[in-house]
Amino acid sequence: MLIDEIARPDDVRRQNRRLVLATLRRHGLLSRTDIVAQTGLSPSTVSAITTALISEGIIAESRDGDVAANRRGRPQVALTLNPEIATVATVELALNLVHAVLFDYKGQLIAEEFRRVATLDAKSDDLINTICLMLDNLLDNRPPGAGRLTHISMGVQGVTDAASATMLWSPITPDSNIAFGEALSERYNVAVAVANDCNMIAEALRWIDPEYYAEDFAAILLSHGIGMGLYLKGKPFLGAHSSAAEFGHMLHVPNGALCRCGRHGCIEAYASDYAILRRTSGESEKAQPAQDVNAAAFDKVADSARAGDGAERAAFRKAGQAIGSGLRSLFSLIDPVPVALVGPGAGVFDLIEDELREVVSGPSGWGAAQELSIRCYPDEHPLILQGCMMTSLLHLDTQVFAPGDAGDTPLKRAV
């Protein structure tokens, strides 16, 4: 066996510790016996890890009552994560919206603020200042006992760099290469992660249903823009230099409809809400895309499509064909994977499903043997929020609260 294939004791210890924390995070209250059953670790290993975590203040014995009270013998003490040891902040930046939230270490919401911002006219300094004002307000008004800020995660509607620090480009703001990570880290003295919102959706789905969203799956956002978060072999797919997986900007029709990105023929130019409204209004497909779409107007078009055949239904058929075409191309590279459709487009899945499946699995696609598994989530915002939250909390579990040298406690090393 090669030397680098041998697991070092410190690595095993860190891995086991992360496993215990992840198990408590997923289940909330567990006894040591339950942790043994959930993790497969030995009782002595679990006892040693939990004793250390209690001494460091990362977990605590719950005062809410014993777990498994119906078991025979001595009642088992419940263990839980200590919510007061840390606070994390999440920020969602979307078209004309900034949403900032504080969570405790258990993932419980502490406080939040929504703010409508004219992002299409906002410069980088405007956006950074707005986010800082919102975070300052939330932090200044934290309830007593809340932990200090230890990490910030941002989910942005745009392309981010592979280092998770900069928004390289976004259709929602005129500026590019906005270094949100650097600016926020300098102001708050904590680590900051900046990710594409679709990647955060995929992270949330993997946490919500780890059995279904396991090794390989795609989360596709169908909204004013079209994006994708992709997991392959249990890891998020990223490009060499950017967040990549720009599903909405894959070519669907050469020299076709005009997309918000300025190119022609993208999937988004046929499948987004602005594309559907552009087609039903009788505008040329080369007309400049609408900067924003009224949700009520989109719902009205969907209702008309359901009511009878016509231009509205034809527009949704075109959308389904475009999405199906993109999935067929994707599956040519990675084989079919489970798909989650997220956002307003998931709410009209009944209008696009037949064409989507026909393109992917029909005679010209993968065939009936390759049945495509699709689940729909019409509201993307809670998933973006949860993905950001988990990114921050898992960072604490693996970086800030990882075991260090003797005498180097997590609280001393917290960012």
Image (cartoon, rainbow, N blue to C red):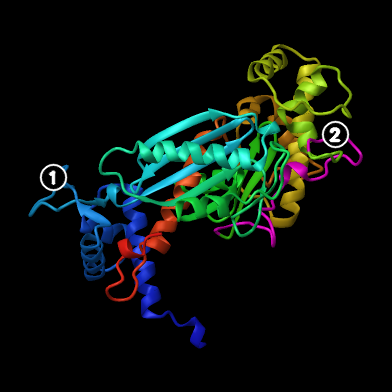
Local secondary structure at mark 1: loop
Mark 2 surroundings within 10 Å by alpha-carbon count, few (fewer than 14), some (14 through 19), many (20 or more): many
**Residue type, mark 2 in image:** Leu
Q: Position of residue 26 (x, y in %)?
A: 36, 49
Question: Residue 145 placed where, x, y %?
Answer: 25, 44
Task: Identify which residue, 190 or 133, lies in the foreground.
Answer: 133
Q: Residue at x 67, y 39 (%)?
A: 123
Picture residue at 27% right of the left edge, 51% below the top: 82
Look at the magenta stretch and give its main secondary structure.
Answer: loop
As for residue 50 lying within the magenta part, the answer is no
* Residues in magenta, as a range: 234-260
Kind of residue at badge 1: Asn
Residue 50 drawn at (x, y percent): 24, 62
List the residue tagged with mark 2. 258
Label 1 neighbour load within 10 Å: few <14, some 14-19, many 20+:
few
Residue 101 falls in image quadrant: top left
Which of the 4 image quarters holds residue 43? bottom left
**Going by the image, does 379 lie left or right of 288?**
left
Residue on which the image places disc 1: 70
Distance between mark 2 and mark 1 Cα atoms: 64 Å
Q: Residue at x 49, y 82 (%)?
A: 5
